[in-house]
Amino acid sequence: MIPLSWYLIVAALLFCIGGYGVFARRNAVAILMGVELMLNAVNINLVAFWRYSVLLNPNPNMPFFTITSGWAWAIFVLTVAAAEAAVGLALIISVYRRRDSVIAEELDLLKN
Amino acid sequence: MEIPSSWYLFLLPEISLTILLFAIQVYSRMLPNDRQRNVGLMTAWGAFIILMITLGLWWYADIPNANAPLEESLIWGGMLRNDMITLVFRVIFLTALMTTCLVSLDTPWLQKIEYFALLITATMGFSLMAASSDLIMLYIGLEMASISSYILAGFYKADDRSAEAGMKYFVYGAFATAVMLFGMSYIYGIFGSTNIYILGLIVQNPTLQSSMTAAGFSFQDFTAVNLVAVVMIVVGFGFKISAVPFHWWAPDTYEGAPTAFTAFVSTASKAAGFAIFLRVFTAGVFGAPTSVTANQEPWWALLVVICIITMTLGNLSAIFQKNIKRMLAYSSVAQAGYALIGLIIFTQAGYGASMFYLLMYAFTNIAAFGVIIIVSNVSQSDQMEDLYGLNRRSPYLALVMMVALLSLGGIPPTAGFLGKFFLFKAAVDAGYWWLALIGILNAFVALYYYLTVIKYMYLYRSDAEAIEIPVSRAAIMGLGITTLVVIILGVYAGPAYEWTLQAAASFMTLAGG
């Protein structure tokens, strides 16, 4: 069986790539894509932890239904990320309509 | 499985909010386009009725029960916790919803069904956040509130600045939430549970069996990962309460967003952030929240540093602002710093004082923003110059603004004074006199810029003095209620403070101990 650490390394890498995307990309849509990558990293983590530790070694101290909480959470993250992406793209479009630009640095009306 | 009726009764405020959400949509369809303002009135009344339902349930049906043991108070499969903390925060959110609706009725372009519906969904998200005792529920509540808030911040599509504020809020918010979730996924992996009270139990008793120990690891193997996870969670929470250094979004969003929404997000959203912060912190997910061991932990030092720089940087930045909304945004960053004092001193009095502070801050800030809304409806801007000579134009508005600013600055006889007094007293009693000292020094700095605004209103003259400022009955109600409560809490805070202290007792009951 592939060890747990492989999944965790992939997730950590994905998270870092996503985080780099958020800080380095100038296009708002690309920033949104970076955030989505980070959320996918979270999902890999959750499902891997669930499969390798909680499912293989269920904790006798906890109620039975808590055994599913890892992947249930991952499904919620997926669903919410979809809603968030919809709202985010709508906001980006609303900015684009006013300013003809989605470059983050050009949005500088609000500053000290 | 039989579901007790008290579980449904506990959710009655949220259920009523859902009903209100549908009711205003039907009502909005029945009204002609030029009378959509009534939808806002209906939302305000609905929020008031739900507030009465919430308090009535507590008063007559003992829901939430302050003395229930932890095992009984965890309901809906451990997702929510039926306790007094939820009640206090629900009161904050519902009053914030009511007064925000009242003060937003004067802005013509906000009189749309979407605006009020999103305010209601955000309030539901906030209440679920405050009630959640499970990381999954906490996340869903947080996203429910955040997604509504992103849209509300960018609600005024015809305005460049509102669109920009919405997008900035969204980008920073989505990033902070993703970081927080990644930290939570590690916590879940290490300790094998999503319930914060079970997590706290396992964190504090390393001998207890969890999935990882069963797999042959010990918790000592994860000390570093655990610390990283805690820092990531603090990033997410720090974003919600706009603590430095996660506050960059706050000034931009507060300035660009519709002012009524700014009032709402700076009070209700901040209180909701504090609710989850307090819950996760006091459940012991970071580590045992007792002064005996925790104040040697690295994450505690991190929280203290955040608290101090939040107060200081917030106040110092506020001094130089020319835009009144931006100034209040930095001031609200600083206020989050004061409320954090109550969180990091590990006493019931501290938690109670923190909740009292958030309660009075909600009224104070909505009064201040309410005046700004009304003034900027006439002047179409929100610079400091708009407030010049306000006393000559409209003495009552100037009076409300003065009470609100004095309360923000912490001058008696307003609620702000007692809020700060309880916080600093709790800090001194717990032995953290230096935190109280930094807080008091900061309060003096803050006084400077609050008093400057009062000087503008009362001593300066302006060319626009002849222009009348129309105030609707609803706005008078909104400003009247908030100002009255600020003064009442300032002269007679006993019952309210006792109430929040009683609620804070629920923070002290930990799982298994």
Image: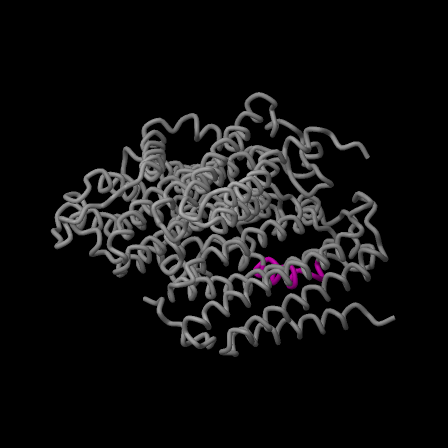
Asked if one can make out residue B507 in the rendered structure from this viewpoint, the answer is no
Q: How many marks?
A: 0
**Above or below, B95 relative to B125:** above
Image coordinates of residue B327 in percent, x first then y, are: 31, 56
Secondary structure mainly formed by the magenta segment: helix
Q: Residue at 30% across / 57% down in the picture? A: B318
Q: Nearer the viewer, residue B240 or B510?
A: B240
State the extent of the magenta-drawn residues as a range: B220-232
Image quadrant holding the C terminus of chain B, namely: top right
Quarter containing the N terminus of chain B: top right
**In this view, B22 is above or below B225:** above
Q: How is the image coloured?
A: one colour
- Residue B156 at what x, y percent from top left? 41, 59
Taking the spot 39% from the left edge, 42% from the top edge, the residue there is B361
Q: Is residue B250 magenta?
A: no
Q: Nearer the viewer, residue B236 or B398?
A: B398
